[in-house]
Each structure stands twice: as C-alpha cells, then as structure tokens.
Amino acid sequence: MLSVYGKELSSRLLLGTAQYPSPAILMEAVTASETKVVTVSLRREMAGGKSGDKFWSLIQSLGVHVLPNTAGCHTVKEAVLTAQMARDIFKTDWIKLEVIGNHDTLQPDVFALVEAARILSEDGFKVFPYTTDDLIVAERLLEAGCEVLMPWCAPIGSALGPLNLHALRALRGHFPDVPMVIDAGLGRPSHAATVMELGFDAILLNTAVAKAGDPVAMAAAFAMAAKAGNIAYHAGMLEPRDVAVPSTPVIGKAVFT
Amino acid sequence: MHVLVKGAGVAGLTAAHELMAGGAAVTVHDPRRDKSVTASWYAGGMLAPYCERESADQPVLGLGLKAAAWWESVLPGAVVRNGTLVLAPARDSGELGRFGSRTSGFVNVDAEELADIEPDLAGRFRKGLFFRGEAHLDPRQALIALEAKLVLSGVRFQTNPTPNRDGEFDFVIDCTGYSRTNQALRGVRGEMLLLQTSDVTLSRPVRLLHPRFPVYIVPRSGQMFMVGATMIESDATGPITARSMMELLNAAYSLHPAFGEAVIVETGVGVRPAYTDNFPRVEQEGNVIRINGLYRHGFLLAPAMAMRAAAMVFEQEKVN
C-alpha cells in the first residue's frame, strides 16, 4: 500500500476539486475514483474569510484526506503565508506546495520552491512539492525536508501526457524509495497507465476529470488505469524485442531454417 | 386566490407575472428597496442555453430554449436575437474545439464571416463559433420594465420592513435567493464590470474562452459593456478583488485593445444561490412554494421555474 508521511493510502489516485460542472458531480467523481486524497485551493474557496464554508463542508463530508495547495502563489513569501493559512483553516499539516514561475505555462519556479519547502518543513509542514522532472531539483527538495515528490509530466491542465519518459525513468531510478506522485499534465487514462508502469506511486488529476464530458465516468476510468499500471509494474513487464516470438510452441515444424 | 411573492429579483418577478396572468391577486414583498442588492442586478442577461450546456446538464438547454420567447412575449422589444459569438485567443484556439464538442446549435465561422458578423472584431480572430439561435437582454431594464408592467396589471408591491402575515394569503412563493440559513444552498460569488467606450461596437454577447478564466462581454445601450463574471465558491459580498478586476480587464483588452481606453463605470458583486447540482428547484411545503438555486441561470431559467410554481398554485386551486 502507498504510504506518505506515515499515512497509508489505499488508492493511487489523488483528485483536485476545481472546475467541475457542479459540487454534486465533484462528489460523485470522488466516489467513483475511490480516491483517498483530494486537493483544495485555499485562494479560491476562501475569498473573504470563512465564507467558503459551504463548499468546504461538502469537501469534509467526503471523508477523505484533504491536501490544501498553494495554487496561484508566485513567491516564497506568498506560498509560505498561504500554507500557514491553509493549516489553520483545513486543520492539516499537509501542504501541496506550488510556487509558479510563469503565469502562462504555470511552470514551477524551482528555486523558490526549494526555499519555500525548506521553510515549511522546518515549520513542521509535510510538504508535497509540485516540481519539474529535474533530478537535481528533486535532490534539493529531499534535502529541504520533503518526503514525497510530485513531478509534472507536462504543464498543468495541458492534457499532453508524459512528454519526457527518459527524465521520468531517471527520476524513478535515482529515488527508488521516495514516494512519487505524477502531478499535472495527464490527459487520458493511457497516460496514467504509462506513468504507473514506469513505477510511479500515484497520480494527481484535476482538469482531465473535471473537464471531461462525463467527469464521473472519467474518474472511474483513471482509477482503473492507475491501478492497472501499478499492478503491471509489480508484475514485471516484457521488454520489447526486435523479433517476433511465437506464443504457441511449434515443435515439429521446421522453424530453424 | 391571493398570493404573496417574497423577493423582487428575477425569480420573484417572473413568478408574480405568471400568477397574475393566471388570474391570482398578487402581492410582491421585498424589504430591499434598492434592486442593486439582488443577484439579478448583476446578471449578464444572456439567453444562451446552447452555450450554457457546455457545463450544465441537458435540462438547462431544454428549459432555457423557451426563455427568449417568454421574455419577448412579456416585454416586447426587450430581447435582442443576434446570437452569441464564441472566440478564443489564437494560442488557446484548442478551446474552441473543446467548447464545440460539448455544445450544439452553432456554426463554425472563419475570419471573413467573423468580420461580417462583428465588423469591429475584423482581423482579430481567425475562427469562432456562432450560436445564431441565442439572444440577450439588459437585465436591469428588464427587471424595471417587468415590475412596471406588473404594477400596471394590479400587482401590489410592498417594501415595508415588517413582513406580511403569511396566513393572510392562500399561497406564499418564496423567491428570496441566497440565505446562509438554508443549508442546502451555497453562495457562488460573481464579480462584474461595466465599461463604457464609443470605440467598439458589438451587436451580441461575445464569450472569450480561456482554459482558466472564460469571460463574456455583453453589449448594452449607451455604449456600455458588461464584462463578467467570476465564479468563486464563496458568499462574500465585499468589493471586487484586484485579481478579478485584472482578469476581467485582461479579457476585455484581449478581445479588443480599445477596451483599454474604456472607462470603468461600475464594478459589481452578486452572490448566486446554488444547490449542489447547480440546478434550480421549485419545492412545495404546505402553501409555501420555494423557487431557488437559479445559480448563473436567473434570466434563462426563471420563466420555466415561474411557470412550474404557478402550475402548482392553480392545480391546488382546482383541488380545493
């Protein structure tokens, strides 16, 4: 079972809560995905103090772990402050740390990310950093106190799927024991299966489910794909070969000519 | 048959109209003298059931298709049937395909057709979607005109702060909108701007798609443009935030740079009442009928809800 910061999670799918057609559909999607962790954005739901209460109580009623995020933060200071507010409001020391470096690509500012991760880890937070697939940045994040990594496989919301399989393989290979969640860029279940087959521990989704024609069905599809990819990774997959190999024995036939 | 309608927003006024038209004696009570405190005041006034289908269920399309005809018959001349134009900035043009795959009732238009439809946008967009069958109205004018029509038709309006005794009425239609005390409802904050410029002319609402922040611009008389609207899970009524203002202005500016020279006539904030499925309900409890949860579909769905509530009242009358 997947274990992050001492919590055992029975599902390998984490789900974002933004952009659904309605809260009712969001709740159904959460159920269909069997997820145990949902992310919530502090900035969006809490504008004006405690007024996001209704949406928040809907999330609470789902009975899953809440992973607040610092979406939309562009500086270390902003991210740290948002994390502290999130801890007060959501009563959790988990924080999905996003420090955005570019407004258009929503690419993480990895320098500010490492700095914010260090400050928050020292402050007792359990940091889930949204990062790129860069090995050295990953190393610095672990040094800063993170025990989980959340590399992207493509820009947030792009639905492009894994763009750099080599980098993702290298990341997995270098940190075999660090829980790693592919966060951002997944567009379809086959993308989820692909990264899970590489040995990643879980996937985090939002747009691909929320903006699907039928978000509830799509949530279920992604859950199955993530599960399939994970089982396949542990089952040991055949490596591709250049020659055909018959699956039926061909004794008695002159195949060695 | 004497019916009390509580609330003079779009839900209350449309319900009052249907009841009046059916022969009931109607009193509308709203202690808020100023219409600018109703969510309806900040509506876009788009009668755009096809476009709304992008993120709403089928009934919004089915019920919403009848809205333009209802408003036209009740307030002749109020409805502008020029359709809706849906555009996307060049680098987000993929959004057009996504929007199109979720909706119906449109034709794809190229740069040349766009220039014919909205000459001021000529050369600015290479393709778009044109929803010919959609319409829009000015929600503020419509609220005022509908109230005036109701007054002329004998509907009584009360703004006294002390409520009527409900027992004096055969029916009470509760159209009071968002309330924190109703646990099933939540508030979805919407922020909007009114811009004024003589440098751009639009004949229909334009929706500008953006993966994170879709907005619409609705032309109104007096060279005014309503730019809206944010969707924030919050019932806070405080002034518009800098971020929202920036996003709305950015969208207007990317539609046409002349909006950069427009004056900001007004910023507004309304709280949309919504149930968890974002679809309105008409619920009856004894002789009280509640119309609520119109969400972002006030002018689009209020007529259908009003007819439903009126049918409940007159059905009961037959039974008695």
Image (cartoon, coloured by chain):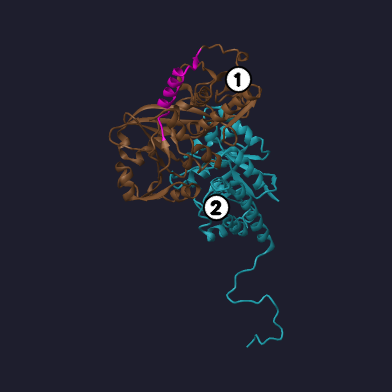
Chain colours: A cyan, B brown
Residue B29: x and y in percent read 53, 17
Find out whether residue B144 is within the magenta segment. yes
Question: How far apart are the two marked residues, 1 and 2, measured between alpha carbons?
Answer: 53 Å
Q: Mark 2 lies on which chain?
A: A
Residue at 60% over, 73% down: A241
Residue B74: x and y in percent read 44, 28
Q: Tell me which amino acid carries mark 1.
A: Phe
Q: State the SS at label 2.
A: loop
User: Residue A257 occupies which quadrant of the picture?
Assistant: bottom right
User: Residue A234 occupies which quadrant of the picture?
Assistant: bottom right
Most foreground residue, B274 or A256? B274
Q: How many marks?
A: 2
Q: Residues within 10 Å of mark 2 (few under 14, many from 20)?
A: many
Residue B85: x and y in percent read 39, 43
Q: Tell me which amino acid carries mark 2.
A: Leu
Q: Give the range drawn in magenta.
A: B136-159
Q: Name the residue under label 2.
A: A186
Q: Which chain carries label 1?
A: B
Most foreground residue, B226 or A4? B226
Q: State the SS at label 1.
A: strand
Q: Do the residues labelled 1 and 2 touch (CB within 8 Å)?
A: no
Query: In what quadrant of the picture does the C terminus of chain B appear?
Result: top right
Residue A63: x and y in percent read 68, 38
Most foreground residue, A243 or A25? A25
Q: Name the residue under label 1.
A: B171
